[in-house]
């Protein structure tokens, strides 16, 4: 019997497998396919201050071993989430973590304050890949100073576990991670999507209506793993890793690199029950390697002695 | 309550090449079929090809409750569909189904089905469904050329079939909306169901609006998941962005913001 449970910043996870924001709706959409309660947690679709329609179609392009998306944070806003969606999902017996997004620091704070009041939500994930409209659309998470500023502002109003989700579109990910921790982050989650582009050669046009979009899927795993590894060596707060996880072996690689838990994202589109299979696969791995507790696997990457 | 979505391994029991670009896959389910309605679609997993990461959506072309089978009418467009076209009987395919909403059952029996290219796919299922409800529609199908026409005997069973080809090699000549049916003062129907390339559906929708008849189309937006979570396949409607895979693929054209 292996022990998959792990405590992350005071939050108990029955296992290290969770699902990524934007790939799992609000959980209820997957009830036909699996029992949500088996998961360590779910990161629900981004919630913003106001209703957002999102970007124009086309919002996606399939790419080699992945896809680009430019959905644009379509959601009905925090009011609707609290009134209509939360009551339907709060009974799930898994950690419900709300992804908080915004265009201004004020918006992040407003949403965080409202989510703070929801009893059955033990944590939020601050999505700092959003463009800061007050700073010419530069993503919050591309500058250490902005990362600290937005985290600090939310920290003041949010009393529970504060996770900050990093954008990989930076030169030095460890800097951003440190900046978020300085601002009060309890957990770092990474990576969000990589900025990419697709072109339709026959039409001579970009495929996405927004020209560029976020790349996800197996293609980004090597970058995500590298960043988890680097951040693990830069900060001492727990890390949740994501980026192209398709199976249990992928998940184990992230844990070895330093992640205490993982998020499964794009893989959910291909096999809606993949996250459950990954839990079983991790168990299997631990039995084969005679590892009693998942805690012993976190950051257990072996290095040659120099 | 929509029926539960299934993820199943289905066996290919027939792979019939219809012509150079189209083939029919008949799939056998391991248990009785769920309720499947015309307009709905399935998401097929395609393995072992370098550039097909996501599933491929296909309309349900017909279904046989007694045999536990359903058919997909597929046009070869790229690597994924080419791979499927070569699969042998006995191969298993992993499929998520049934997905999406369905064509409505209108109050009238003066119905016109209009299809172009691989847009014909859901129309056979619709014609079979209308037949069960004692309705015999007019079915207008447009193809590039005579060689592309497939399954005409099937359509003839269920409706009054009219054909038009781009090159005039069979039936009238021209695009679907060039057909003489649309040039009359009265188009003689009260409800149109249409599926095909977007410019064709838009043109038919405009005609429907002029003649003040109801029109339902089946949209084919690009999808990642096909079951409502990725929010990639949206189309703008009078109620904001709606998902082609859940609130669609069938929409009444009055609601769409593309005309």
Image: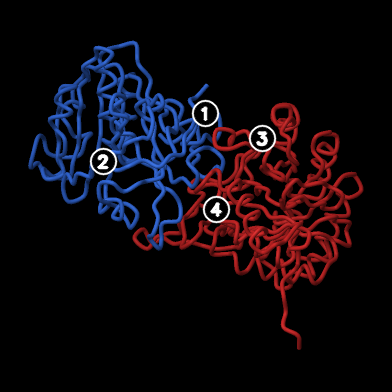
Chain colours: A red, B blue
Please name which of the two marks, 2 or 4, marks the residue nearer to the observer. Answer: 2
Mark 1 element type:
loop
Q: Counting other residues with Cα less than 10 Å from the Cα at mark 2, is it few (<14), some (14-19), or many (20 or more)?
A: some
The residue that appears at 60% across and 69% down in the rendered structure is A222
**Where does label 1 land, which residue?**
B238
Mark 2 element type:
strand
**Where does label 3 land, which residue?**
A76
Q: Nearer the viewer, residue B19 or A9?
A: A9
**Where does label 4 land, which residue?**
A69
Sequence order check, earlier mark of 1 and 2 = 2
The residue that appears at 67% across and 63% down in the rendered structure is A254
Q: Is residue B118 left or right of residue A32?
A: left
Q: Are marks 2 and 4 in contact (CB under 8 Å)?
A: no
* Numbered circle sitting on residue B13: 2
Alpha-carbon span between mark 2 and mark 4: 36 Å
Q: Judge whether residue A52 can be spotted in this image.
A: yes
Please name which of the two marks, 4 or 1, marks the residue nearer to the observer. Answer: 4
Q: Counting other residues with Cα less than 10 Å from the Cα at mark 3, is it few (<14), some (14-19), or many (20 or more)?
A: some
Alpha-carbon span between mark 3 and mark 4: 19 Å
Image quadrant occupied by the C terminus of chain A? bottom right
Where B259 falls versus A261 (above or below)?
above
**Chain ID at mark 1:** B
Alpha-carbon span between mark 1 and mark 3: 16 Å
**Chain ID at mark 3:** A
Q: Judge whether residue A135 can be spotted in this image.
A: no
Where A237 falls versus B131 (above or below)?
below
């Amino acid at each position: 019997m292996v022990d998959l449970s792990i405590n992350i910043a005071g939050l108990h996870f029955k296992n290290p497998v969770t699902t990524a924001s934007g790939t799992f709706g609000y959980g209820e959409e997957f009830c036909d396919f699996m029992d949500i309660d088996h998961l360590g947690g779910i990161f629900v679709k981004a919630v913003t201050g106001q209703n957002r329609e999102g970007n124009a179609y086309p919002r996606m392009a399939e790419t080699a071993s992945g896809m680009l998306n430019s959905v644009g944070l379509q959601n009905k806003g925090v009011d609707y989430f609290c009134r209509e969606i939360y009551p339907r999902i709060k009974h799930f017996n898994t950690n419900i973590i709300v992804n908080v997004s915004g265009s201004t620091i004020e918006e992040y704070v407003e949403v965080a304050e409202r989510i703070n009041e929801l009893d059955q939500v033990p944590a939020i994930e601050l999505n700092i890949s959003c463009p800061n409209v007050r700073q010419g659309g530069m993503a919050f998470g591309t500058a250490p100073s902005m990362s600290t500023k937005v985290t600090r502002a939310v920290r003041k109003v949010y009393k529970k576990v504060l996770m900050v989700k990093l954008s990989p579109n930076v030169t030095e990910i460890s800097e951003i991670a440190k900046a978020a921790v300085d601002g009060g982050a309890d957990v770092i989650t990474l990576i969000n999507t990589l900025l990419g582009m697709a072109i339709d050669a026959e039409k001579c046009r970009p495929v996405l209506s927004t020209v560029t979009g976020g790349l996800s899927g197996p293609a980004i795993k090597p970058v995500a793993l590298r960043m988890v590894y680097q951040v693990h060596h830069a900060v001492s707060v727990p890390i949740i890793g994501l980026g192209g996880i398709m199976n249990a072996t992928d998940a184990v690689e992230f844990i070895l690199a330093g992640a205490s838990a993982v998020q499964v994202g794009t893989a959910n589109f291909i096999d809606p029950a993949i996250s459950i299979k990954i839990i079983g696969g991790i168990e299997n791995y631990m039995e084969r390697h005679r590892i009693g507790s998942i805690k012993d696997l976190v950051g257990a990457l072996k290095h040659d002695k120099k | 309550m929509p029926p539960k979505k299934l993820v199943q391994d289905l066996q290919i029991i027939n792979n019939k090449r219809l012509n150079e670009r189209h083939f029919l896959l008949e799939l056998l389910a391991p248990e009785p079929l769920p309720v499947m309605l015309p307009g709905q679609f399935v998401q097929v997993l395609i393995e072992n090809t370098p550039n097909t990461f996501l599933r491929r959506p296909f309309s349900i072309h017909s279904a046989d409750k007694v045999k536990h089978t359903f058919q997909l009418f597929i046009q070869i467009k790229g690597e994924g569909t080419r791979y499927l076209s070569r699969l042998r009987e006995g191969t298993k395919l992993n499929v998520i189904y049934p997905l999406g909403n369905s064509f409505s059952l209108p109050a009238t029996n003066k119905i016109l089905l209009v299809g172009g290219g691989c847009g014909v796919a859901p129309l056979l299922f619709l014609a079979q469904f209308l037949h069960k409800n004692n309705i015999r529609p007019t079915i207008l199908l447009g193809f590039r050329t005579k060689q592309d026409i497939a399954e005409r005997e099937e359509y003839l069973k269920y409706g009054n079939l009219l054909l038009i080809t781009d090159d005039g090699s069979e039936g009238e000549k021209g695009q679907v909306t060039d057909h003489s049916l649309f040039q009359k003062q009265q188009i003689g129907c009260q409800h149109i169901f249409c599926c095909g390339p977007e410019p064709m559906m838009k043109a038919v929708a405009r005609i429907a609006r002029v003649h003040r008849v109801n029109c339902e189309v089946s949209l084919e937006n690009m999808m990642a998941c096909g079951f409502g979570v990725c929010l990639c396949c949206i189309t703008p409607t009078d109620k904001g962005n709606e998902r082609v895979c859940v609130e669609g693929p069938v929409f009444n054209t009055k609601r769409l913001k593309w005309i």
